[in-house]
Amino acid sequence: MPPIGSLAVIGGGVIGLSVARRAALDGWDVRVHRTDDPGTSWVAGGMLAPHSEGWPGEERLLRLGLASLEMWHGGFLDGLPDSVITARESLVVAVDRADVADLKTVGEWLAAQGHPVHFTTAARDVEPLLAQAIRHGFIAETELAVDNRAVVAALAAHCESLGVRMCPPVTDLASVGADVRVIANGVDAPSLWPGLPIRPVKGEVLRLRWRRGCMPVPRRVVRARVHGRQVYVVPRADGVVIGATQYEHGRDTAPTVTGVRELLDDACAIMPGLGEYELAECSAGLRPMTPDNLPIVGRLDERTLVAAGHGRSGFLLAPWTAEAIAGELNGAPLPDAELVEVR
């Protein structure tokens, strides 16, 4: 059968590749314009965590995240190796009394939204690697974590097997001659469509490698509030990923001593055994943030769609975004697509 039409996806991170794969499966002639820079998707922790990342006031983001998590549990993994999944549960813990209060705030808010979580005062029974003083936590049983780099590589390989062509980046939307164009290049989206309210927010991430004789790698994601700061420890096959700081610093992607020190201090405060791991990598990426933390997904004009501004939720929302763009392309928008408006 001849293709439905030609589609150019601008951006080769998890969002752009997810959109491209979905469109290729629908019969579009797809090409992806991407740079050689691995980008933010290469730095991410890979958590699929709508419960443990939720916060009062972000009800719409929670609903989108839960819908997308269900797609991860459904067919989104088709064509990807099972090994991309690195954890199948999250444990959220608190270090001091103020952190416990925040924990309860999130738990009560989730329950009020109809998504209760399981509280525990024996967190070390769930995760023995925790520091001895940590007792309070809640378990998000349906959350997942993925190896972000393996997912990006697998999506690219699946796209190419479907006939998607990988092309050089573009800096001028007018130069893209496809029937339809999708802007999915994260923090660079405003350079193609001025006025998109997307700004870069720096986040530092560490990778620790397990060494012989060390405590074993945890089997679940462990998230914590340490004196008000959030930190996460995400399992990988050879160690853990620790993240992530968050602050406005333009387009600077150099890890700082302060950021790395805080991450190590906070991670070792919740899991002291990590201090014996090898410090394998320090890196920083630029999250594409919007004023309300919601992604910008929808139609800009007859030929142009946008899928950008996913902030800290790019991997989580990749399936939902791919379905939303597919709905626009095929004339059948998702029922909940009105949750995200193009500004």
Image (tube, rainbow, N blue to C red):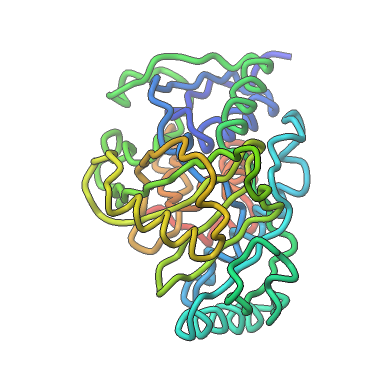
Q: Going 61% across and 72% down the picture, which residue do you hit?
A: 132
Q: Quadrant of residue 38?
A: top left
- Image point (73%, 76%), residue name: 118
Q: In which quarter of the image is the C terminus?
A: bottom left
**Residue 142 placement (x, y as % from top left):** 74, 60
Query: With 236 as the anchor, is 338 left or right in this view?
Result: left
Q: Quadrant of residue 282?
A: top left
- The quarter of the image holding the N terminus is top right
User: Which of the two residues, 277 or 204, is positioned nearer the viewer here?
Assistant: 277
Furthest residue in direction left, as rendered:
250
- In the orientation shown, which residue stands out farthest toward the front? 213
- Above or below, 112 against 338 in this view is below
Among the 4 quarters of the image, the one containing residue 43: top left
Residue 76: image location, x then y, percent: 71, 40
Question: Taking 238 as reference, is 103 left or right?
Answer: left
Q: In this view, does 321 lie above or below 141?
A: above
Residue at the spot x=35%, y=50% of the render?
Answer: 260
- The answer to which of 193 and 91 lies nearer the viewer is 91
x and y percentages locating residue 60 in the rendered image: 53, 67
Q: Give how far across and how far down residue 34 sits, in percent.
A: 42, 22
Image label count:
0
Between residues 94 and 289, which one lies in front from this camera angle? 94
